[in-house]
Each structure stands twice: as structure tokens, then as C-alpha cells.
Image (spheres, grey):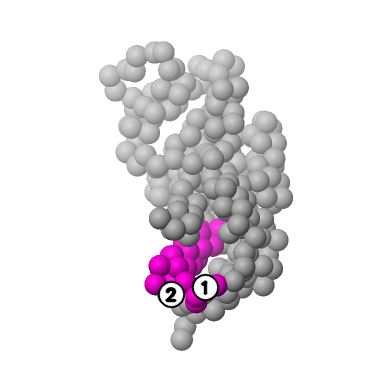
Amino acid sequence: MSKYKELQSAFIDKIEADEYIGLDTSILFYNKLMESIEKPLKMILLFGKPGTGKSVLLNKIHHDNKESKPIYLISTPILNEEEFLRTLYDFLFPEKEQPETISFNRFIQILHTLKDEKHIIVLLDEAQLYDSTMMEKIRLISDSRVIKFVVALHKTDREDLIAKEHFQSRIWETIELKNGTVHDAQVYLQKKIVQKNFFEVATMLTKGNVKLIHRLTGGNYREINKLMYTLLEIYDYYEKKQPSKIAGNTFQNKFIEMAGLKLGYIHA
């Protein structure tokens, strides 16, 4: 297996905590979210375009704090109301047997009895998949102050659901993740490659390469991953078929553009 083929695994889109890359901006968002979690807030809104790192950040926050705080992650939306309530019940009472049925009204009553006893944090990823009825019930649950929600969702037209006045009044902190700068992209790429111990390949990336990658992807980390995966696929092909074409100590912009064409970032 060529080094390019092997390195492709670094750019498969994954959301595990160990995929978190400590960039200046990602550390800033991490610290800001942790500060918000420590405040007496009912809800925190974390939003941004797909590929800006919301899911990885939530996984990292959960991984780092689950042993010291009552913090829980719902990474895949639970769209069935009773199943959602049962999941929250398990978070609140991990050692307790669940009641036979849990209605929403009964769950709210239980929360009121816990107001001065328990406080937990629930990280809700992909919250744009919950319908308006479910989001309204999440809002009502947050009013108990027993469960604090960090609500992560894509910055799309569905954002108007969160922006409603009756809902916005309960979100006391809003954190928006954005695409990376050219510098962020350079550090991201270098760290991704070095994590896999491909130091030689890391030195092949020039500032010109990074600027081109950033221009094609807009600095979106998911798109950077797709472009690099495709670029490495191209290099793997030429290393096997025509190694003279990729000779040299740097990546060639024409191959980055070729990857961009394949992905539709460039229209011929």
C-alpha cells in the first residue's frame, strides 16, 4: 500500500473525539462552550454550516468531561418522544428502574421534584432533525433548570425555529462556528498528516497548495477532507502507474485542481 493510500484514512469524515484538532479557533470555541456550560443557563445554541466542526466539538466536550460532570451526549436525534424521555430519565436515574410508561406531563412533574437536587447537561447534536413540536418540548424541559441543553444545529433556513421569540428568550448564549481561515487550514492539514506519522508528506504541502485548497473549499473542514482524500487517491494512482508525473518534493497545484474538478469545485 502506498503512503498516499494509507494516508487517505486521515481524511475520512469522522466525528470521534480524537478527530478534534486543536486550532486557535477550535480552542477558542471549546473554551467558550465550556464557559457557557458553567454558567447558570437553560440552553446554549451551537450552530454553523455543515462541516464547521460542531459534532467533533460536542464529542470532545463530552469525552473530556464525562468523568467529572453529569454531562451526556445524544449524537443521533431520538425522534420518538417516549424514547427521548426515557433516555433523559436514564441520564437522571442511571441506577433506577424506569416506570412502565412516561408521559410528557409526568416527566415534567418529576423534574419539578428534582429542582434543588439534580442538574445535568445534555448535548443534542443534529438538532435540526427534531420537529417543531419536539423542540418546543425540549424548551419546556429546559425551563425546569434540571436539564441544561446544548443544542447544535446546522445554519440553514430551519434556524427560524430557534429564532422564535418564545424560544430565543431561553437561549442565553449563542456560539457560531465558522469555516477556517487559510492559517487554520494549514495547521489543520499539517496536524492531520503528522498524527498519522507521515512527516515527509506534511513537508510536501506548500503555502500555495494550502491557499488553493482553502479557495476551493472555502475553509470548510468537511470539504477539505473530501478534497485531500481525492488528491491522495490521484497521487496513489500516479505513484503506481506513472510515478514520474508526481516527482518532486511538493504537491502540484494541477493535481489539486484535478481533485477539485472531480468534486465539482471547479467547472471545466
Which picture quadrant has residue 34? top right
Marks 1/2 in contact by CB < 8 Å: the verdict is yes
The answer to whether residue 245 of the structure is visible from this angle is yes
Give, as a single range, the part of the protein colored magenta.
221-247
What's the residue type where badge 1 is placed?
A: Ile
Residue 88's disc number? none
Who's the residue at 65% across and 46% down the image?
Answer: 22
Along the line of sight, which residue is nearer the eye, 101 or 91?
A: 91
Q: Is residue 211 above or below residue 203?
A: below
| Position of residue 65 in the picture relative to residue 141 (left or right) | right
Along the line of sight, which residue is nearer the eye, 18 or 25?
A: 18
Measured Cα–Cα span from mark 1 to mark 2 = 8 Å
Residue 21 in percent (x, y) is at 61, 47
Q: Is residue 168 above or below residue 91?
A: below
Residue 207: in magenta span? no
The kind of secondary structure element at disc 2 is loop
Residue 14 in percent (x, y) is at 46, 48
Which picture quadrant has residue 247? bottom right
What's the residue type where badge 2 is placed?
A: Gln
Residue 246's disc number? 1
The kind of secondary structure element at disc 1 is helix
Residue 254 in percent (x, y) is at 54, 79
Along the line of sight, which residue is nearer the eye, 133 or 8?
A: 8
Residue at the outermost front position: 244
The residue labelled by disc 2 is 242
Q: Residues within 10 Å of mark 1 (few under 14, many from 20)?
A: some
